[in-house]
Amino acid sequence: SVCLHCLTLWERTLIAVKPDGVHRRLVGQIIQRFEQRGFKLVGLKMLKVPEDLLTQHYCQLRSKPFFPRLLEYMSSGPVVAMVWEGHKVVQASRVMVGHTNPAEAQAGTVRGDFSVLIIYRNVVHASDSLEGAQREIQLWFTGKELVNWDCCDQSFTCE
Ligand code: ADP
């Protein structure tokens, strides 16, 4: 939705620290990047992702040769799932996260800075479109798990 006063384009996106990111204790640094960028955390939980959630989440990839390996990787430990809200957060998060293949991810991106160079172990997930974000947030979170709150920043950005 758009704020008619400050023209902020409010969006929400799903960000998930994948099992390698949790194992390597990168959760805090990843959260810090999204906070510093000015986004608002509205949902957060840690879980071992059930297989049916993974197959639904990655349903567009189910015919890919790497799909079984992807499921195995995503089941190899807990995941920290988050919903972040803010101005054009979907596209901004994709830029912050970087290229799917860590070898091609730019320095300064989460994957560029933290990945080891194995394509499927790329530390973090970020929704790739507004529609994708809405679909994924509904899959991963119930309405009650998402918290509406006013961040004090809004008093600066929107009079
Ligand atoms: P992204 O996560 O950047 O949106 P995709 O949706 O294309 O990328 O792929 C989902 C996940 O599947 C990737 O993040 C990565 O973990 C894994 N993956 C993608 N491509 C490959 C590949 N060629 N080989 C192994 N794993 C892959």
Image: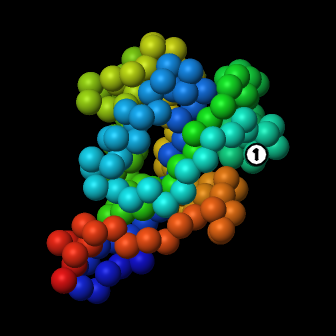
Labels in figure, total? 1
Position of residue 87 in the picture relative to residue 138 (left or right): left
Position of residue 89 in the picture relative to residue 128 (left or right): left
Position of residue 121 in the picture relative to residue 86 (left or right): right
The foreground one among 49 and 89 is 49
Please give the name of the residue rendered at 27% of the width and 25% of the height, measured from the top-left corner.
107
Does residue 107 appear in the picture of this structure?
yes
Q: Which residue is mark 1?
A: 53
Does residue 65 appear in the picture of this structure?
no
Please give the name of the residue rendered at 33% of the width and 23% of the height, measured from the top-left corner.
113
Residue 40 percent location from the top left of the image:
38, 59
Please give the name of the residue rendered at 51% of the width and 14% of the height, measured from the top-left corner.
118
User: In this rendering, is residue 148 above or below 82?
Assistant: below
Q: Quadrant of residue 38?
A: bottom left
Residue 100 percent location from the top left of the image:
47, 30
The foreground one among 83 and 106 is 83
**Quadrant, the N terminus:** bottom left
Residue 13 percent location from the top left of the image:
49, 56
